[in-house]
Amino acid sequence: MTIDINAAFDSGNIELVGISGDVVDLNIRHDAYSDFYQWFHFRAAGAQGRTLTFRILNAGGAAYAFGWPGYRARVSTDRREWRMADSDYADGVLRFTHRFDGDIAWFAYFAPYPMERHHDLIARIGACHGVSHRTLGRSLDGQPIDCLTLGTGPLSLWIYARQHPGESMAEWFVEGALEKLIDPGDAAARLLRDRATLHLVPNMNPDGSVRGHLRTNAAGVNLNREWHAPTPDRSPEVLAVRNAMDRTGVDWAIDVHGDEAIPANFLAGYEGIPSWTTAHGDRFYDYGRRLAARTPLFQTEKGYEKARPGQANLSMSTNQLAERFGAVSMTLEMPFKDHDPSPDPDHGWSPERSKALAHACLDTLAEVI
């Protein structure tokens, strides 16, 4: 049978270079109007009984090529369970292999979160008692920016994800957060709903998600560099969410992401904002320490360097919200690799563990408020 490579579907991204025997050479397509690329998602068919080696030839030029060492591609035969494939990176080429027991398999940078699942999530959670839905605005391609709100308390809590569309673990995290928050038997969720009003935006970049982008929207714009001055023609997604935040205020905020290189979950804060105080920062640090004590899925040793005093980038949402509202604002990063302090040799970091981390984050938030 002839091997068929296809990425013409939601979040698909790959270009076939050539096939020689059991070796399939590929390139990742750039984000539109951008130099960014790293996300891939494709299917291979017609290979039953064969072991294929896939070579991504342009991996060395990817946005975060330093993240390839130690990374393992994800593979699924049912699009529900995603396991890690045997992978290696050398001389600028990412290689991974798969034995085809059936005719077809799907491969991705991380377990995808398709837009159809996003709409199912909005329908399912939006129909629950005590949950309201708002369309905050529209993307450049006209897709809705969905927000689900629940709770009646005075504190304003925002959780938002997928500014960078290729970081699909972020929406798995929000799905887990929403499932916990609607559970009437969950004590932490009840406390949060009583003491706060929670606003959750599962996907801030639906255009990039559908197009198979790593980091940008339909205009090639990195949304997490637009929070100081979003515009309708470049970043309507940020403008819609920031305008909604201006109406509600923000006391706590979690911006959910994925990191290509660091094999662990960690938080980044708002050190370096002009209004930084030790008391303000201590609230952020206290949250991180409590979260690490609560779950082996989080740690505080690995992470990004802190900005120097007065050097915070206010175009990034975490810094902008901390400065704009005095919020305890944070960026949560999850790995494309695995969480080395508590690894899973079969699945690596996964949708299920992303959702479990969301539960721990909310339990910790209930504890601190």
Image (cartoon, rainbow, N blue to C red):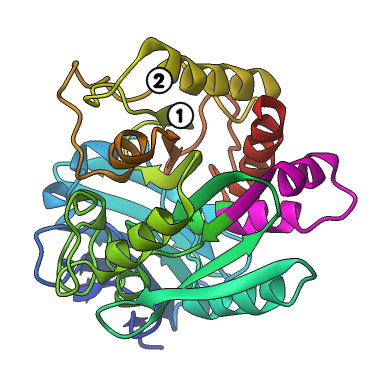
Q: Is residue 190 magenta?
A: yes
Q: Quadrant of the C terminus?
A: top right
Name the main secondary structure of what is drawn in magenta.
Answer: helix
The residue at which mark 1 appears reads as 266
Look at the image and tell me whether residue 48 can be seen: no
Q: Quadrant of the N terminus?
A: bottom left
Say which of 6 and 221 sits in front: 221
Say which of 369 and 42 sits in front: 369
The residue tagged with tag 2: helix, strand or loop? Answer: loop
The residue at which mark 2 appears reads as 302
Say which of 127 and 289 sits in front: 127
Rendered residue at 31%/45% (across/down): 317
Q: Is residue 68 above or below residue 125?
A: above
**In the drawing, does residue 199 fall left or right of residue 245?**
right
- Callouts 2 and 1 close, C-beta under 8 Å: yes
Residue furthest out toward the right: 185
Q: Which residues are magenta?
A: 174-198
The residue tagged with tag 1: helix, strand or loop? Answer: strand
Rendered residue at 78%/41% (across/down): 191
Q: Is residue 184 magenta?
A: yes
Measure how far apart labels 2 and 1 are at the Cα level: 7 Å
Badge 1 amino acid: Phe
Badge 2 amino acid: Lys
Say which of 305 and 276 sits in front: 276
